[in-house]
Image (tube, grey):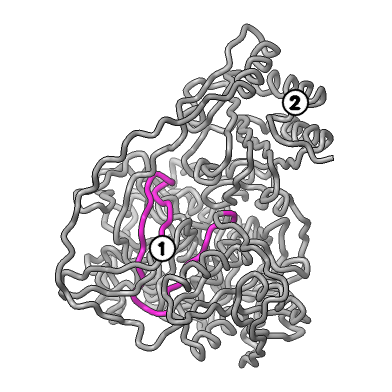
Amino acid sequence: MALTIISLIKQVPLPTEMRMGEDGLMDRTKAKSIINIDCQFGLEAGLQLKKQYPDARMIACSMGPQSFEVALRTAISMGYDEAYLLSDRKLGGSDTFATGMAIATMLKHLGFSKDSKEPFVVLAGRQTSDGDTAHVPSQVAENLGIPQATFVETIKPDGKGNVIARRIIEGGYQMLQLPMPLLVSLTPTGIPPRKPSLVGAIKARNSKITVLSVDDINLTSPKIGISGSPTIVAHVENIVSERPPIVLAEGHNESTLVDNLIADIKRGGNVLVKKEAKEKKVVERPDFPVVDIREGAKGILTWAEITNGKIARPSLELLTPARKLANELGNDTKITTVIIGKNVEHLAPTLIEHGSDEVIIVENEKLEEYLVLPFSDIITQIINVRKPEIALFAATTAGRELAPRIGSKTGSGVTADCTGLEIGEYINKKKEMIIYPILHSRRPTYGESKLATILGFVFPQISTARAGTFQVPVREEGRQGIISKFEPTLSEDDFRASILETVRGEGGLQGLFEAEVIVAGGRGTTDDGLELIKKLAEALKEQGVKAEWACSRVVVDEGFAEYARQIGQTGKTVRPKVYVAVGISGAIQHISGIKESGKVIAIDHNPKASIFHNADFGIVGEYQDIVPELIDRVQKGFTFGVEVHK
């Protein structure tokens, strides 16, 4: 079989070198750059796939400025045959919608579409470190009209024209079977990328990188570049730690250190003294006319994800910002929730009691488990009929691939992993008008160092909300609402991909949201497979404390824990009374997931670790020495000041 393997890669700036320009937006022009880490795993997955198909044609593709040729030459030095770069000033400032469309158009120009006679596989990284949206793979797949599997750890051909993919889901994994052509996005949990060989480096130096322009690929859509993208970055601001300086325990040995830590915690007093806020510069609001661009779009749509026969907690959390937005919009704005599955109608009253005004039921035996193709088609059909102005999804593994695929179908932009949603206005100085109302979606970005405000100008405005960011609304038993049914039009193509197996446990997901104490391990605790982390959490449980264990992203990426236990930008946001960070360096991506914790206690052997700048109390020492002492104290009754439930 003449298989073609295509790897999509991106060259990304180092977050530490990003600077904010005078316009309040990010300037990456002077930042050093590398191949995005997740993309490197995609490259390696392609080379592993070639072992099964020795005659496969290997292509690397990218979109960006001429400097991206460096990344493409690296791909060639690793073993790829050809490289193509889509580079055009007209593409500058493209959002993920425009990027996905442009890359798909380039691939079609190269001869790859759903109607291609020869099979092909498109590989990509899960997400890029500068954006962390995970949108582009889904949007490329939708524009090509091919099935997809995202958040994939491993792929293997079955010899029958299909690929078997192991996909991460909350609390476990799925085994999917997908026919070629298809697109797969890889997590950094697979085979580590190889180093370029000397022979490969020589080949790369002498290879031609084919540079294509918008005209070359016949990209005629006006929805490209900063002016044509359906979303824009309206504002970026620095994220500043709101915690007071840490109180570090002192002592000559681990026993004394732990005793002094306990004394520090009991003594308390580590309170942030807030400085008087500086007067904000008052910007005069121009006397422009206020324009409503919704063209009849009204209401808020949410999707309720079902796992293990229950409504997933992040889907209930969505109803909190949805109600806030509905109140801000006024005019009897309604919240409509879509629920898809087999025998799911009995779950509708729960959604209404938590705040939905209407629940739309879609039931079908084929829809018992989530699949991105039929679910995206169904929700798109409902959007086309109901015409909501806002659509919200939880940023779970399902929501993060579903929302952008729907966005490409509806022509809408999508904002990922939002931690704040509100209704505001946009002053368009060029057109001399004020657009109102419009959704302001706020999300941490650039390695969690900045908070960006994203606006969308195509309806529905679509956003995903980071799990754990919003509280589940208080349940109002007996609350009444409308329950309706929707009969979608589905085709056999919607079921090209199939689920072979689903392995899902609670995986700590529910426990993390309810825990009063969370003990989390980082890279520095993997020597014993996080055993001491788990033992400390278990010791707290035995004392009657609602406790759970968790981890940082690198621990999941290295295979020591499942994704459901990951805390941070691409994991969960938690708000326990006490968060114990052990062997966690304190990357800003992780800090974003714990910033709402009551007290943060840090244990690390490196006194210069960033975690100590974002914690209340801490110990500098080896976790193998410190944690056993903490376990001993917990067994003797110490509970970090948290109330015992017995």
Provide the residue span drawn in magenta.
Answer: 442-468
The residue that mark 2 highlights is 638
- Amino acid marked by disc 2: Phe
- C-alpha span from label 2 to label 1: 42 Å
Residue 332 or residue 71, whichever sits in front = 332
- Mark 2 and mark 1 in contact? Answer it, CB < 8 Å: no
Q: Please tell me whether residue 518 is drawn above or below residue 368 in the rendered image.
A: above
Q: Secondary structure at mark 1?
A: strand
Q: Residue at x 22, y 65 (%)?
A: 89
Q: Nearer the viewer, mark 2 or mark 1?
A: 2
Q: Position of residue 393 (x, y in %)?
A: 55, 69
Residue that numbered label 1 is attached to: 441
Is residue 156 at all visible to an observer of this figure? no
- Location of residue 65 (image quadrant): bottom left
Q: On the rendered structure, is 293 left or right of 254? A: left
Asked if the stretch drawn in magenta spans residue 297, the answer is no
Residue 489 percent across, percent down from the top left: 61, 93
Q: Is 444 within the magenta? A: yes
State the residue at coordinates (31%, 53%): 236
Dot 2: element: loop
Residue 426, by quadrant, is bottom left
Q: From the viewer's perspective, is 607 left or right of 214?
A: right
Quadrant where the N terminus sits is bottom right
Lower position in the chain sequence, tag 2 or tag 1: 1
